[in-house]
Image (cartoon, rainbow, N blue to C red):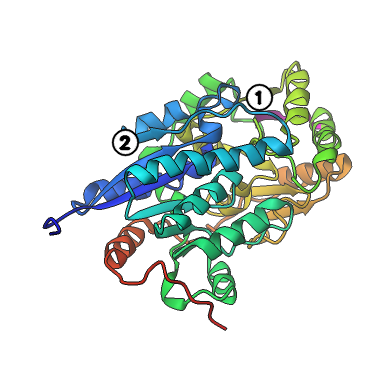
Amino acid sequence: MKKKNKKININFFTGKRGGFSHFVPILKQIELSKKIEYKIIVADMHLSPFFGNTVNELKKYSKNLILLDRIKNKDTISNRLTVISKTIASLSKIFKNKKPDFLFLLGDRAEVLGAGIAAMHFNIPIIHMYGGDITQGGTDESTRHAITKMANLHLTSNKQSYKNVLKMGEEKWRVFNTGLSSLELFKKNFFKSKDYLAKKFRIDFSKPLILLIQHSVTWQVRESTWQISQTLKALDKLKLQTIAIYPCSDPGYGPIIKRYNNFKKKSFFNVYKNLKLDDFYSLLKYSTLILGNSSCGILECGFFKKYVINLGIRQEGRFCENNVYHLPHNSNKIYTTVKKIIKKKIIKNKITLYGSGNSAKKIVNIIINFHNKKNLIKKKFII
């Protein structure tokens, strides 16, 4: 006999610093509800000292953490396959002991694919955030669409991605355009002051500030050294205040970090393994532009009325507007475009392609409404 008023049990899965920020507003909304309980399964980069032990920041947001065994990071393709296989094995043990009502997945990382495979075979309904996005620059593209086909409910970040998921044969009742949940973080009391940031990061806000986040491209691993060299060559010529953050653990990250550590001798350049959530977004709010190939540059910078220089093919195809400059890995073009942006007028209006910052409540309502839906795991391909 079922217990009355039994709470819905959800597992969130996270392996990367950037993805977790999208969960935070949802977790806060869940904590206002008396109908849901949750655990956060923590894996991969979060557990790596090399990438800053970001699990410590997660502990500030929640005590409900399940830590998977740490997998030693190596800059190889085979290491990412090890991450997938060990994630499947670790989650198999967890799900065998206790199956959640839903597994929440975000994005397109290798470890997320492993989590999806484990949940699918245990008949655990998967809620997938940001399926249908297009990025033509690496294995993330295929991984994202594979997770979409395993998932049972879809929360898309924009109207175009919503249409893309439907084109993949998903039933319409399973798909919701909820927008980007991270935007809900950005309330007035969330941001650090300029004085705090200036002191902590040794910044002069009367001068331009560049944030640099450049990842390797899994279809161009051998070009990683040359690509970051072009970026740093432009920065050396510009000599503008720059804060760089380590890339993610995709193959090819080693040469990027090596070049950063050599380049940090420059007085205008500082590099960090990781930045706290509120520190990072506060720096973004007050920066001149973001440079590199991070999804953040396209997804969130429009909301901040911020210019972006997006390099190479990693984010090719993402839904964006004219605040984003798409450039090849060419030092001269990077240099001239940065100079051009510095002279441009400030963007007046927020760009709301990815919503207006009100998605968390919608998402929690979807969880509650679909909790008891029959045949949620039985999928059909719609032509």
- The reply to whether the magenta stretch includes residue 294 is no
Estimate how packed mark 1 is, as few (under 14), some (14 to 19) or many (20 or more) residues with alpha carbons within 10 Å: some
Q: Choose top left, top right, bottom left or bottom right for residue 60.
A: top left
Q: Earlier in the sequence, mark 1 or mark 2?
A: 2
The kind of residue tagged 2 is Asn
For the point 42% across and 52% down, which residue is it?
104
Position of the N terminus, as image quadrant, is bottom left
Residue lying furthest bottom: 383
Q: Is residue 186 visible?
A: no
Q: Is residue 105 visible?
A: yes
Q: Quadrant of residue 349?
A: bottom right
Residue 208 is marked as: none
Q: Which residue is mark 1?
A: 271
Q: Which structural element holds mark 2?
A: loop
- The crowding category of the residue bearing disc 2, from other C-alpha atoms within 10 Å (few below 14, some 14 to 19, many at least 20), is some
Residue pictured at 54% horizontal, 34% vertical: 44
Q: Residue 291, percent across and down? A: 70, 41
Q: Who is closer to the viewer here, 72 or 329?
A: 72
**Closer to us: 28 or 104:** 104
The spot of residue 306 in percent (x, y) is 60, 48
In percent of width and height, residue 345 lies at 66, 51
Real-space CA distance between mark 1 and mark 2, rounded to the nearest whole angstrom? 31 Å
Q: Which of 295/78 is in front?
A: 78
What residue type is disc 1 on? Val
Please state the horizontal and vertical placement of residue 169, each as a whole percent of the image. 56, 76
Residue denoted by label 2: 64
Q: How many marks?
A: 2
Q: Secondary structure at mark 1?
A: strand
Q: Which residues are magenta?
A: 238-244
In the picture, the quarter occupied by the C terminus is bottom right
